[in-house]
Image: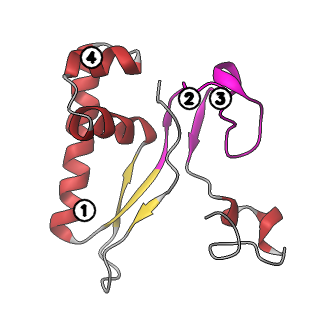
Amino acid sequence: MVWREPGFCRFRPIGIQGHGAVMLTVDEFEAIRLNDLEGRGQKECAEKMDVSQPTFSRIIESARKKVADAIVNGKEIRIEGGEYMVGEKGMPKRDGSGRGMRANRGRGGCNPPENSGARKNRPGAGRRGGRW
């Protein structure tokens, strides 16, 4: 269970290309948000994410290793994938399918509107013209 999908998909070091990328899943992103940013304990984080404490411990350890690898080695961080359910009621998935917790199940990732084929050819679409 995650509170909501991230509003962005990538972090990239300025001026560095070709050092690779690390893939941070949406549940790993949520674990970092809860534990490191909000300062909650692992037990509370596990309850919020509706997983066991040992599972949460594995998720946060994996996430921290990936973030450390990206920072130390100048890699891009991509946030996508994983198995999760969005907990923010009424929050539509980025692909526009449904509302609420039941409609937001399954695999997903960060799919900003400028990456969809429907928006590419519209005037004003993309990073500057759209909300992304």
Pointer 2 or 4: first along the chain: 4
* Mark 1 or 2, nearer chain start: 1
Q: Looking at the image, do the residues carrying marks 3 and 2 touch, with CB atoms under 8 Å apart?
A: yes
**Pair 1/4: label in front:** 4
Are the residues flagged by discs 1 and 3 in contact, CB closer than 8 Å? no
Cα separation between marks 1 and 4: 27 Å
Q: CA distance from mark 4 to mark 3?
A: 23 Å
Mark closer to the chain start, 1 or 4: 4
Left or right, residue 106 beside residue 38: right
Amino acid carrying mark 4 in the image:
Glu
Circles 1 and 2: CB atoms closer than 8 Å: no
Q: Which residue is mark 1?
A: 70
Which of labels 4 and 3 is toward the front?
Answer: 4
Give the residue pinned by disc 4.
44
Return the x and y of residue 60 as percentages of the image width and height.
24, 34
Task: Give 131 or 109, whichever is nearer the viewer.
Answer: 131
Residue located beneath label 3 in the image: 104
Give me the residue at 35% from left, 82% from top.
17
Looking at the rendering, the stretch of residues picked out in magenta corresponds to 80-109
> Where residue 66 sits: x, y (%)?
25, 51
Say what secondary structure mark 4 lies in.
helix
Whether label 4 touches label 3, CB < 8 Å:
no
Left or right of residue 113, residue 61 in this image? left
* Residue 128 point in image, percent of width and height: 64, 76
Q: Earlier in the sequence, mark 3 or mark 2?
A: 2
Q: Spatial distance from mark 1 to mark 3, Cα to Cα?
A: 29 Å
- The tag on residue 86 is 2
